[in-house]
Image (cartoon, rainbow, N blue to C red):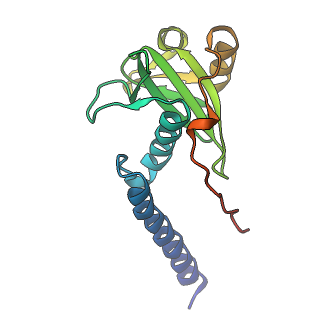
Amino acid sequence: MTSIDNRIQAIQHVLASIFASQRTLKVLAPEFKWAGLGNLLGDFGELVAIDAYNLTKAPAGSNGFDAIHDDGRKVQIKTNYAASQVGFRGTADILLVLNVTEDGNWSELYFGPFAIVLAASRRSERDNKNMIAVSKLRELQKVHGFASGYNPAHLPDLEVMPVSS
């Protein structure tokens, strides 16, 4: 086997592991799609946000929002891993942006009024969405963000296995 064959075979094993993990995720949380590599992060963020913030998942096909706050306000949820910008479309009452690290831990970047972020964002006609820098979201959180709605009592106890290096 050549080094190219070894590389391809190693990548095939990684992809097989990812797809096996997606099948497991579909069993654990079937209300999410867990489809495509790009959607994994978004589905994870929605799952965490809905559970940790005690939100109600929006009906499938809801336009511009992913969940509903207990007071009826519509919440758009965005998840960021490494990008310096967060993109969003549509409108909602509340925007919740989470940051996820490579070990699966997460933190709140912004939880507050959607309109404030919309006003501070820039429009990307090419991508048909609004964009805002993560650094700007952090600034807006300090001034306009809600006290965290995160409630650790809403999360189930899970044992997270470390990733071997």
Q: Quadrant of the C terminus?
A: bottom right
Looking at the image, the residue that sits furthest to the right is 165
In the image, is 26 to the left or to the right of 53? left
What residue sits 63% from the left and 29% below the top?
Answer: 108
What residue sits 67% from the left and 53% below the top?
Answer: 103
> In which quarter of the view is residue 154 placed?
top right
What residue sits 52% from the left and 34% below the top?
Answer: 49
In the image, is 99 to the left or to the right of 47? right
In the image, is 142 to the left or to the right of 126? right
Q: Is residue 131 positioned above or below 103 on the image?
A: above
Q: Quadrant of the N terminus?
A: bottom right
> In which quarter of the view is residue 150 placed?
top right
Looking at the image, the residue that sits furthest to the front is 153
| Front in this rendered view, residue 51 or 109 | 51
Q: Position of residue 6 (x, y in %)?
A: 57, 82
What residue sits 37% from the left and 46% below the top?
Answer: 32
Q: Is residue 125 positioned above or below 44 on the image?
A: above
- Please tell me how many numbered marks the rendered image carries: 0
